[in-house]
Amino acid sequence: MQRKGRTAFIVAFLSPAVFIYALFVIWPLLQSFVLSFYRWRGVSQQKTFVGAENYRKLAVDDVFWQALRNNLALLVGVGFLAIVLGVVIAHAMQGGGRLSKMLRGVYLFPQAISLVVVSILWMFLYNPSFGLLTTGLKAVGLERYDHAWLGEPKTALPAVGTAFLWYIAGFYIMLFAAGLRAIPEEVNEAVALEGALGMKKFWTITWPMLWSIKRIAVVYVVINVMNVFALVYLMTQGGPDRKTEVMLTYLYEQAFKNSQFGYATALAVANFLVAMGLSALLMFVFRRDPQEARA
Amino acid sequence: MNNKSILAFSLTALAIVLTGCGSPGTPGTPDKVTPVAVKEAPTGATAKGEIEEVAFKGGYGIDFYQKAAEEFATKNPGLKVTVTGDPRVWEQLRPRFVGDTPPDLCFPGWGMDHWALVAEGQLLALDDALKSKPFAGDGTWGDTFEPSLLALGQQDGHQYILPYYFNVMGWWYDPGVFARNSWTVPKTFDDLLKLGDQIRAKGIAPITYQGKYPYYMIDGMLLPWAFDVGGADAVKAAQNLEPGAWKSSALLQAAKMIKQLQDKGFFQKGATAMSHTESQTEFLQGHAAMIPCGTWLSSEMKNVMPAGAKMEFMLPPSVAGGKGDASNVIIGIEPWMIPAKAKNPEGAVALFKYMTSLDKAKQFVEQKSTLMAIKGSDSAKLPDALKTPAKVFKESKAVWSVQYRQWYPAFETEIENALTSMLNGEATPEQFCDRVESGAEKVRQDSSITKHKVTG
Amino acid sequence: MKKALSTSGAVLFALTVVAPLIWVLLTSFKSGAEVFASPWALPKQLLWKNYTNAWQEAGISHYFMNSSIVTAFTLLLLLPVGAMAAYIFGRYPFRGSKVLFGAFLGGMMFPNFLVIVPLFFLLRDLHMLDTKTGLVFVYVAYSLSFTIFVLTGFFQALPGELAEAAMIDGCGHASTFWRIMLPLAKPGLIVVGIFNAIGLWNEYGLALVLVSSEANKTLPLGIANLVMTQHYESDWGALFAGLVIVMVPVLVVYWIFRDRIHDTMLAGALKG
């Protein structure tokens, strides 16, 4: 290839992307860390450097810990179910030809529609007056199992979690379906010859072979759950009494309702570090161990 | 994403944390609360140029303001007035205040902490303007307002907020339903306890409420009952965050009364998860006999009024033998203001004078079915649902207002959460009061929060 | 037998995905009173008025327009800028290009909310807060990572001989890109474009913070707004109709391109 003008060409072609990315992504990212050391109400230019005060406040803020607990509860509950659903449905779809291709399309419906629609939709499903759940239970005489799903402390988080699961399950089905497809045909045939079948085959052969997909899946669970905002913000605003509060709804409240911008940024940084820490931990837990490597 | 990129990214993040604090960013100015100079608005003698008005678009819409603006522009050739609004208008106004580009006249709705704006010097004082001539008639502009309502917009002897329409808080019932069942409207809490059992016997919930927005219960039960029990001083002390005020015997008894209704099963099932429209629709559908709500109820629900349904206002049943006047009533003004950085404050004052003229006020009453803070506006033809509240307001010996909510929004969140928690059976009235009191203590300790006092 | 059982499980799950959507569709034809009185019943008649109410009175048409404008302009800026950068990363390795590429990929991983407060004030300082322009630039910036990632793969896969032949014929680096390579990457551009378009059409968090006036609100903000307004005016039927209006275009586009979207998503997920 011609060397002439290569450098100039590279610079010219990269600079628009670099400029936009640096200005709107990198610079605010740096600012985030800076701002978390300030107290700032944002109504005026008054900004006060307060050192680690925001982080100290965070450490003793019950709401922050409650939000973190809720995030972790969603992580464990929804994450676990999403992965189980992903594996089971992906397994069920295997080799289904046209039908499974169509089902695959359907599973991703929720991902294609806006989270706003998903949230409102589920709000309505849970609605205590006309929601399908409440009226359905009444219709079949199970009224005593009815709840004000999004309003009661015990049911609110599971209710939000169910909506969340509905939203993300398709993604994990897709992941595991791809993982299953990637298992070489010879492996399956060899296993069939040895007579391993059903659950045994799954646990000894298939599950270990999925190690890389599992790892990707858990990292995505962390990312998805730590980023949950719209769903909670629209469905419950974190209520009742913070029972569904998550880190990002609390961040939003502190920044755009209470005008505590410095504190909100500290929350953002904390959220980020938790997500990074959890990802790293889970990647370690789900690393490819030598035994699996042999499988 | 592989191990390496995670690691690289974490390290970058760490590096940013470690090095970032010193480098970019504006140097901090000391956080001493400099007393903000009071800036007086002009008197609005003339209206020229352009006026931008931004208003909360709630149940009454913004069409009336738009119409008034048009009329005013025709009266003042060459004047251009734009009126915009939004149901969450405060979210738009906040960045504009920050960016020093606020509109000229604004009504930021309930989501804006306008006392923070006063504290930051973001609003013009309107004392001179109120001493000047009104749009029509003699006297001063200030004389045209109901004094008790005007007083709610003052701080340190200056007027920053002006009332426009106002709401009366109370309870609602359907007189038709009550007549059919020969129920009588409960005057006292004991009446309510008896009536509630009768209502329940008919398979109807005695009370429903807006569980997603607990301030309806605060203004409809907790605070009026605290007033009934402990008198004006008890709620004043609470609003002023005096130590112990939120767990005083008055507040505690009010909380216990709510809990008692809850324990007797008087609240509609599912209400804890309902939004205002949902619970209000339940009420109109006859699934619940009573609901706490302000005078905006009738216009808010006009589209979903079932045929034959009626609504009538009542004061919350009072507490017999309490210190407070049984006629006490909570009212709320809707705050209008002129930003200190407004480009055309002169025009804004002139426009608002026009909007608050008696003729416009009467029109507002008739078109929007609400009460106005302008003297004499109740001589307009009042809609049925407003007749009782107007009478209650006029005859009340103790008109008061819930003000701490705007002053301490984070504290309000805490009270609402505590109330939700009690209504969900997670806390006793004592625990509720303790929790609210410790929330008040937090505000008292936080020097970065500007403190306010109930005047009068 | 076992196969049938597991297949029916898969079908059942598909039904739980679709059923709520169908309920929304049916409810969108009901009157406000009907919504409350008989949530499980079929609509008594098809109340198309809900749709005109949502489209006109509730202002959905306006939000629809805004979303179209923002999405279109974002793509118009994003695709060329992204493709240019991807072309360099794919075919012009230089010292440090791996690091730079990594910096771009990093954007795929960290949450937008980490930067929301500084971003809000950055836009304010640029006088881009609450403007469609501001939203477009932010959307371009936050879509670059994925776009560059996918297109780099495309350019790498294109046969190098074509570019070399063009260069020998006297085309410069740039004109080789515009005349030969970019047209060859068209399938990639389409996939990336559609994938981004769906995401942008649905985006809520950034828009919530960065846009505030009615004039600039996008469809997700608008529909959330409609829920709020409905809290003041109570038109339930129109609200459901509004949901349908938001969902349907995306679902149609998604269904047409579902296989390619699926592959792109998967590629992004596996390599991210």
Image (cartoon, coloured by chain):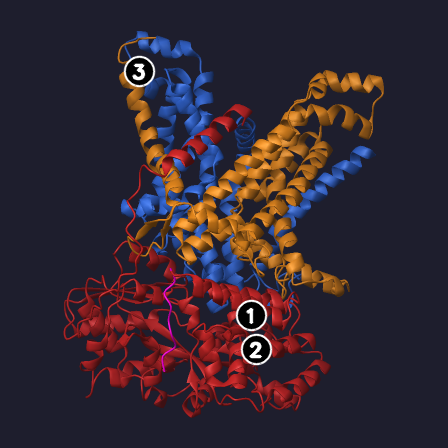
User: Residue B417: which numbered mark, if any?
Assistant: none
Chain of the residue on which disc 1 is drawn: B
- Image quadrant for the N terminus of chain A? top left
Residue C54: percent from left, percent from top: 46, 59
Q: Residue A76: say if magenta.
A: no
User: Residue C173: which numbered mark, if any?
Assistant: 3
Rendering colour (chain A) = orange
Q: Decide: marks 1, 3 in contact (CB < 8 A)?
A: no
Q: Secondary structure at mark 3?
A: helix
User: Residue B210: which numbered mark, if any?
Assistant: 1
Q: Which residues are magenta?
A: B448-456
Chain of the residue on which disc 3 is drawn: C
Q: Secondary structure at mark 2?
A: strand
Rendering colour (chain B) = red
Which residue is under mark 2? B291
- In the picture, measured across the screen, residue A184 lies left or right of residue A17, that is right
Whether marks 2 and 1 lie on the same chain: yes
Chain of the residue on which disc 2 is drawn: B
Between C24 and C216, the one lying in front of the other is C216
Q: Decide: marks 2, 1 in contact (CB < 8 A)?
A: yes
Q: Of the residues shown, which amino acid type is indicated by label 2?
A: Ile
Residue A252: percent from left, percent from top: 45, 52
Mark 2 crowdedness (10 Å alpha carbons): few <14, some 14-19, many ≥20: many
Kindly report the distance in space between the C-alpha atoms of the residues bearing marks 1 and 3. 66 Å
Q: Which chain is depicted blue?
A: C
Residue at image coords 65%, 30%: A285
